[in-house]
Image (cartoon, rainbow, N blue to C red):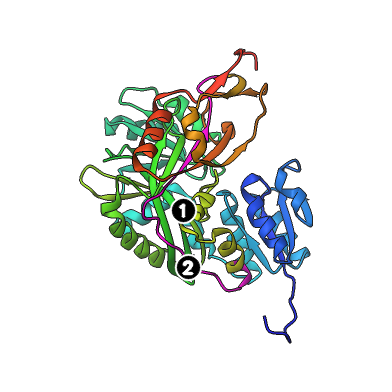
Amino acid sequence: MSGGEKFMAKKILILAGTHFQIPVIEYSKRMGHHVITCDNRPSNPGHQFADEYYNVSTTDIKGVVDLAIAKNIDAVLVYGSDPAAITAACVSEQLNLPGNSYESVSVLSDKGLFRKFLKDNGFPAPVYGVFKSYNKAYAFFSDTGKTCFVKPVDSSGSKGISKLNPGDVLKPALDYAMQFSRKREIIIEEKIERKGPHIHGEAFVLNGELIFLMLGDQYFSQVTVTAPMSTTVPSIFHADIMQDITNELIKIIKLIGYSSGGLNIEIIRGQNNKIYFNEIGARNGGNFMPDLVSMATGFKMVAANVNAVLGEPVDIKYKYPEQNYYTQLILHSHDNGVYNGNNLPYEFNTNLIFRKEYFNIGDYVHTYKDSRHVIGVYLYEFQQKGKCLDFINYIQMNKIIKLGMSDDKF
């Protein structure tokens, strides 16, 4: 800024105020901007850092649009919250603000629409069906004769997902999925036989161009095989296909018309080495994944998200990690009980670089089914691949959370 220029503070509406939004709230405040947050949980910790908070659900599109108009905002930002992505697109479209189109975000936010997009455009996709009625869903599942996943089309955080083998009873899985679908639609898709761990990470798009991508190896919990436990970046097992993934992602971004902002990406590498895009969320992820990739690369993910929606310059510099590995651990319990710390070996303490716990010793915690039951998140840095692999092996093979008494009454 030259001496003659005067800084103009802007009003930015940030959708939700959980732990995951605190980094963008704090950055916006440091830059001198006026921050407004909204969601339907006044107790969320991020609101205390904002200038204003309003009790409006981030999925109440009309309510959020009305709030944005009333407050005459300059920008709207979704970060770490999948359900709010469509709302942010509606606000930016109706108020003519920087952001993504409702059409592009709708496709990315609906599992059925995304599968159709992949199939229509020649990308690999599992056999799937989208249903609102039990009878048609039952017929589809019976005809497949294969292991399938049953999911709400429009939910996130592993909520409402079940894995069924041939012959399993479908009705409970359908009922469970419907509980978490705002559209009252579910998708059933055949399981893809994968090669190696899942692939997971973060990306950032600016003016239609992919300017950042960092993907790693993702592992799932043994207690709930549809809920994530850990991601390590960069990938140890899939480095040979990263350029192919990049090329395919660029094609998807162009075809779908995604303009600017973060992406949270989940990929399955098939036994035939085909690349299956399982999910592309129209926002950066939760569980401090943006923090993990920023630590690994130096890419300023928080600043990029805020500056992009404000129409300010985005620093695109980053460095791909050459030797170090960075690992996220999602703390969760295998059983109901009283939280009594963790069983992580002392040898990994020196690698711990970030920790966030949502429960205190003595609090009651629940068996891990989805993001509602996460106890905390730890981030680690390893200088040796061997020690990183030892850590991954340990968390896969052991119960991490120590429990006191268990009481089914809770």
**Circle 2 — which element?**
loop
* Image position of 333 with respect to 383: above or below: above
Q: Position of residue 207 (x, y in %)?
A: 49, 72
Label at residue 79? none
**The image quarter in which residue 287 lies:** top right
12 with respect to 84 (left or right): right
Q: Determine if the magenta segment contains residue 344.
A: no
The N terminus, quarter of image: bottom right
Q: Position of residue 7 (x, y in %)?
A: 73, 76
Q: Amino acid at mark 2?
A: Lys
The residue furthest bottom is 4
106 with respect to 140 (left or right): right
Which of the marked residues, 2 or 1, is nearer the chain's N terminus? 1
Badge 2: few (under 14), some or many (20 or more) residues near its Cα, within 10 Å?
Answer: few
Q: Amino acid at mark 1?
A: Ala
In the rendered image, which residue does mark 2 sit on?
317
Q: Determine if the magenta segment contains residue 330.
A: yes
Main secondary structure along the magenta-highlighted residues: loop
In the rendered image, which residue does mark 1 sit on?
296
Mark 2 → mark 1, Cα distance in angstroms = 13 Å
* Image position of 146 with respect to 109: above or below: above
**Circle 1 — which element?**
helix
**The image quarter in which residue 378 lies:** top right
The C terminus, quarter of image: top right
Q: Position of residue 198 (x, y in %)?
A: 35, 42
59 with respect to 154 (left or right): right
Does the image show residue 160? Answer: no
Residue at figure coordinates x 64%, y 53% from the top left: 23
Magenta residues, start to end: 309-335
Residue at figure coordinates x 60%, y 52% from the top left: 84
